[in-house]
Image (cartoon, coloured by chain):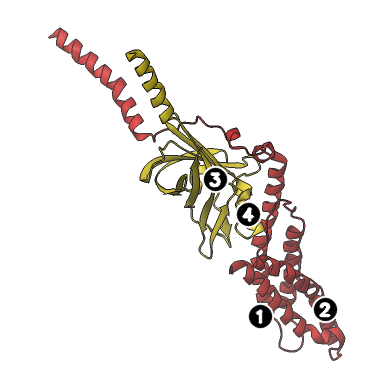
Chain colours: A red, B yellow
Amino acid sequence: MCSFLRRLFLFSMLLSFVLPANLSRAAEPKKVEKSLDLSDLGFSAETTKPDLERQSLLDERTHKLKTHEILGPITWALMTATVLAAPDHGKASTLHQVLGAVTADLYFTTAYFSWTAPNDPSAGATKTNLKIHKALQWVTLPLMVLTPIAGIMAQNQYNSGQRTHGLAKQKSSLATALYLTYSASFAVMVFDF
Amino acid sequence: MIQLSILFFVLFAANAEASTWKLSSGSLEYTLKHMLHTVSGKSTEVKGIGKCDPKCSFLVAAPVKSFGSDNSNRDSNMQVYTKAAANPMVELRTNIDPSAGTKNAEIEIKLAGKSHSYNVPISFTPESGGFLVHAIVPMNLSDFDIERPALLGVACENAVPVTADLHIQSK
């Protein structure tokens, strides 16, 4: 009896060592042998060498462009609200003025993150939609400067009892052109073609 | 005489087993899906080598920055997500005996400083002096701790299948 118990104990001990090891081995995927080295392929040392300086440049670039991508749609939403709050005729509401000011601030903040993002010297070809997006900034930028100036001038002329004239008279046209070009600039980045 | 025959046979057999393969051309292409876009990036700057002595071992690699998707900003972002400057190469390793037909094999991918293995069917189509090797690796970004890129607050799909089309030649 004693020898039977001893054998049973030894057998269970053996199982406890062997069984889990076998089970874990079965769950693991087969290891791929690594007898070949990257240096066997003939890539230049420059290609295979890690470049931590470039990694930090890329990280900074992406951080800034990500912020640009987040602020861009917010600016568009605020611009839409500014257009909707615009008066048909006469004095502009405080809401329209505040929304306009915040939109202008956000526009330049959004642009700042794009302009200051470091360039990637090894970047490949630029796609058409990105070229259009970049080109449209030369339309939206002057419009974003002129529209608020025209708005302030129109407000001052209205307050002093004058009929709007000069640049102030073009306020609606400038605002419409700005809204359309900014919307196009936003749309080309959303809808790929 | 018998001993000499055995020695000759052993040497001949050993010689017949050993073979070297080289990648003459090929491409690796990833496909990334987003709610609004499906993007693919391809590299033809692929190099590879294989040795069978007698077990076969293949290594295929490409610089991560050589993958182009026709959008420099996106490619630049891809290099950030994959930490391409710190880990400039993507490596594929497998132990498969090249012969016509399709067979399952383990492919280990090293990307962004992490390795992950996939069991996938690999097809070998005979062509002059070698094979056209085709495989689709069902790669996931999470397998390599790569953050999923997002557009307009919506993240891309985790699955990024990689298609390998490789022409290997026996040396």
Residue B122 locus on image (x, y percent): 40, 46
Judged by depth in the image, the label closer to the viewer, 1 or 4, is 4
Cα–Cα gap, marks 1 and 3: 62 Å
Q: Residue lying furthest top in this view?
A: A2
Judged by depth in the image, the label closer to the viewer, 4 or 3, is 3
- For mark 1, name the chain: A
Quarter holding the N terminus of chain A is top left
Check residue A84 in the rendering and tell me which mark sits there, or answer none.
Answer: 1
| Residue B28 relative to residue A62: left or right | left
- Determine contact: label 4, label 2, CB under 8 Å: no
- For mark 3, name the chain: B
Seen in the picture, residue A175 relative to B84 is either above or below; the reply is: below
Q: Secondary structure at mark 4?
A: helix
Residue displayed at 64% across by 60% down? B71
> Residue B3, located in which quarter of the rendered image?
top left
Which mark sits nearer the N-terminus, 4 or 3?
3
Density class for disc 2 (Cα within 10 Å; few <14, some 14-19, many ≥20) is some
Cα–Cα gap, marks 4 and 2: 43 Å
Q: Are marks 4 and 3 on the same chain?
A: yes
Cα–Cα gap, marks 2 and 1: 18 Å
